[in-house]
Amino acid sequence: MAHVVPEPFNYLGFILVVVGAGLNIWTDALFKKEKTTVKPHEMPTTLLVSGPFKVSRHPMYLGMVIILLGLFLYLGSLITLVYPVVFFLLMERLFIPVEEKNLEMSFGPEYHKYRAKVHRWI
């Protein structure tokens, strides 16, 4: 397996894994604090707009992409670049449309205003 990220640069991937995991933990804590669902196919009861939601409408998905990119860097193999790309495409096609439809149904104009200000990913 050819390594495209040589040492010591591959250790930067560890930083990305930590950042992505931290983002996911922070986001999950906000979902729990507000007692709303983290499951994309369930109807949300609260529109989260603080913390990481000020920068990304989907910070948990962003956190996972960051983790997967970190693993790519750390492992240094081109094949591992497939995982963040596939994850991103799956979220874009299968999960985010359902989640955003539920948010629109639950919060209407409030969600439209939020969506106009905050990007989907970053």
Image: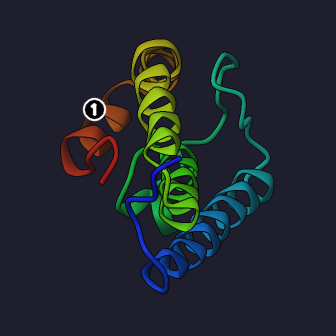
| Helix, strand or loop under label 1 | helix
Q: Residues within 10 Å of mark 1 (few under 14, many from 20)?
A: few
Indicate the amino acid at tag 1. His
Quarter placement of the C terminus = bottom left
Q: Nearer the viewer, residue 121 or 18?
A: 18
Q: Is residue 91 left or right of residue 113?
A: right
The answer to whether residue 50 is visible is: no
In this rendering, position of residue 6 left or right of residue 68: left
Of residues 30 and 93, the one drawn nearer to the viewer in this rendering: 93
Q: What residue is shown at x 43% (from left), y 33% (from top)?
A: 88
- Which image quarter: residue 111? top left
Quickly name the residue at label 1. Answer: 112
Residue 110 to residue 118: above or below: above
Q: Nearer the viewer, residue 1 or 23?
A: 1
For image coordinates 48% across by 81% down, the residue present is 7
Q: Residue at x 35, y 61 (%)?
A: 55
In the displayed orientation, state which residue is furthest to the front: 1
| Nearer the observer, 79 or 42 | 79
Can residue 19 be seen here? The reply is: yes
**Could you tell me residue 38's position as x and y percent?**
71, 37
Residue extending farthest to the left is: 116
- Could you tell me which residue is drawn at 72 percent across and 28 percent down? 39
Count all numbered tags in the image, as a single digit: 1
- Give the answer, above or below, for where 69 lies relative to 111: below
The location of residue 12, given as percent across then percent down, is 48, 79
- Percent x, y of residue 76: 49, 60
Residue 46 in picture, x, y percent from top left: 62, 41
